[in-house]
Amino acid sequence: MNTYVVRYGQMRHIGEYEGVEGLTHLRGEKVLVRSDRGTEMGEILCQATERTSSFLENPFRGQIVRVATPEDLVEESRLAEASIRGLATCREFAGKRRLQMDLVDVEVIFGGERMVFYYVSEKRVDFRELVKDLARAMQTRIEMRQIGVRDEAKLLADYGDCGKPVCCNTHLSRMPPVSMRMAKVQKTTLDPSKISGRCGRLKCCLRYEFDTYRALERELPPIGSRVITHRGQGRVLAQEILAGKVVVEFDDHRRIVVSRDDIVGVEKSKFRPAQDEDDDRIEP
């Protein structure tokens, strides 16, 4: 029996699920799966292989119940309406109990086993009484889940500055840490308004090419080092990483862009160039 990679839930969970016996599932096909949370609507991404498994971190493994029927798709639309009612009900109860929490979204599990309420809060919230209120009103199991601003964007954001759907809402299953150094190595503008995503944090895409930039950077002499070229000796002032070149100030004060192939020898500088304090600032 074939196993497939399936994406499901509003937080875009990914798991490996055994297919229905005798059927071959196609990419994009809607299916019902039995996850650790209950019966859920999912989407087939691809057939599971050793290669796909190497990219997944502890995926949940289960069984595909069936291919989604037209009736299932209608039920999915009905659950969207139920989530709107649940959102309004939770906000009403939370307001009455004066809870300091910002409710973001509500997810109704397809099989009706539970409702998951996602919220943002700077402090710890005692929601035990709130859960009791919701359980009585909604007649199902209630789960409260605190999330961060990146996860909030994953639930609510639509399009990024690039004009495409935000990565956290499409293919990213976890949020990679991002630092200002990644922007500086790639010579990206350091204007916070231009390198911040919909969540207000540094854009996740700054990490995508960072490893490649670092690999190319290591092939060039570091800034501040003394180099010997066919044109003479000088000190490296700057790097053009993608071009594979450096800006060299020669002893006669000439400044020339030199290819790494024209560099005969390198003498590393004893000093380290000053860096901004936020170079290594990590944003989770």
Image (spheres, grey):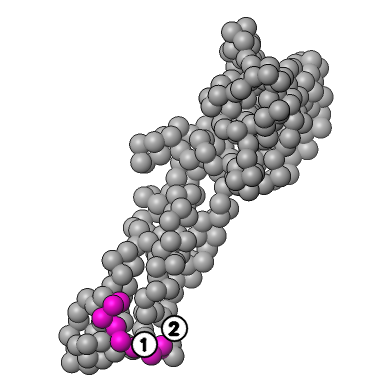
Give the residue at mark 1. Answer: 266
Magenta-span inclusion, residue 262: yes
Seen in the picture, residue 133 relative to 259 is either above or below; the reply is above
**Mark 1: secondary structure:** strand
Pointer 1 local density, CA inside 10 Å: few below 14, some 14–19, many at least 20: some
Question: Can residue 173 be seen in the rendering of this structure?
Answer: yes
- Marks 2, 1: nearer the viewer: 1
- Percent position of residue 156, x then y: 52, 32
The residues tagged by marks 2 and 1 sit, at their Cα atoms, a distance apart of 15 Å
- Percent position of residue 6, x then y: 62, 31
Give the residue at mark 2. Answer: 272
On the picture, is 226 further left or further right than 6?
left
Seen in the picture, residue 21 relative to 70 is either above or below; the reply is below
- Percent position of residue 15, x then y: 67, 35
Magenta-span inclusion, residue 40: no
Quarter occupied by the N terminus: top right
Instruction: State the mark number for residue 191.
Output: none
Which is nearer the N-term, disc 2 or disc 1?
A: 1
Question: Can residue 83 be seen in the rendering of this structure?
Answer: no
Amino acid type, label 2: Arg
- Percent position of residue 91, x then y: 65, 25
Amino acid type, label 1: Val
The residue segment tinted magenta is 260-269
Seen in the picture, residue 245 relative to 180 is either above or below; the reply is below
Q: Looking at the image, which is closer to me, 219 or 161?
A: 219
